[in-house]
Amino acid sequence: MRKIYDLTASSRFGTLKKIEEFQTLFNRCPVIKSELVQKISATNPHLFHRDVERIVNVILDEIIDALARGDRVELRGFGAFTVKHREARQGRNPRTGEPVSVSEKFVPFFKTGKELRDRLNGES
Amino acid sequence: MHGKTLTRADLAEAVVRKIGLPRNESQELVELVLGEISASLARGEPVKLSSFGSFGIRQKGERIGRNPKTGKEVPITPRKVLVFRPSNIMKERINAGMPTTAKAAE
């Protein structure tokens, strides 16, 4: 179950409507991988649950492998995964204010596709 | 620095190669997996895929934007946006196994 947010958090939001928005978007139980597998198995009775699980893992693994090679993955209507380069920089420990050096790294980035973006906002 | 671009077809090919399903069925399954993720998000449900990452939804309030071409101020309507948070495993795998300097030089 999701953690129920402390009621004092509501004081940060002005109106009741905003609190409701906050709750609907953040307290809603997320769909996890096993539920995704279950739904797909239910609509494809000819596939074993175990196989669907393997297929989902193969797809996700393939995306990570591509990004690790420096490739990008573009899934029309869904979105695109790319890797962004972050230069080495001088950071700071926010608690102590001590300077720390952060080495260069690559970070995965996802850009939502147009179709999914529109669906999210109830269009089409 | 980007080499190739992978598409649905490449993901389907991986399913053919690693699972041994026929190509047409693999294509359908890739579509089904993406479709199911999209459908959950469209319903407003975040999707968490362990060892991959999670897709969350953020509500954005109205704000004033600017048309970059004309410089005119235009209101940007409140909307929902999708945010992807990669898992630590994904971040590690992307940074491991590739000499960062060599990759930056590409």
Image (cartoon, rainbow, N blue to C red):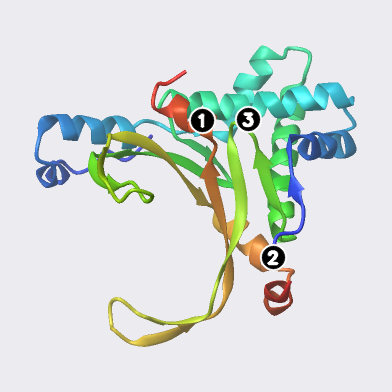
SS for tag 1? helix
| Residue lying furthest bottom | A99
Image side of residue A25 versus residue A116, left or right: left
* Residue indicated by mark 2: B1
Q: Chain of mark 1?
A: A
Residue drawn 62% across the image and 63% down it = B92
Q: Mark 2 and mark 1: span between their CA atoms? A: 27 Å
Q: How many marks?
A: 3
SS for tag 3? helix
Q: Are marks 3 and 2 on the same chain?
A: yes
Above/below status of A107 relative to B82: below
Query: Crowdedness of circle 2 by 10 Å Cα count: few (<14), some, many (20+)?
Result: few
Q: Chain of mark 3?
A: B
SS for tag 2? loop
| Residue A9 location (% of width, % of height) | 16, 45
* Residue indicated by mark 1: A116
Q: Amino acid at mark 3?
A: Leu
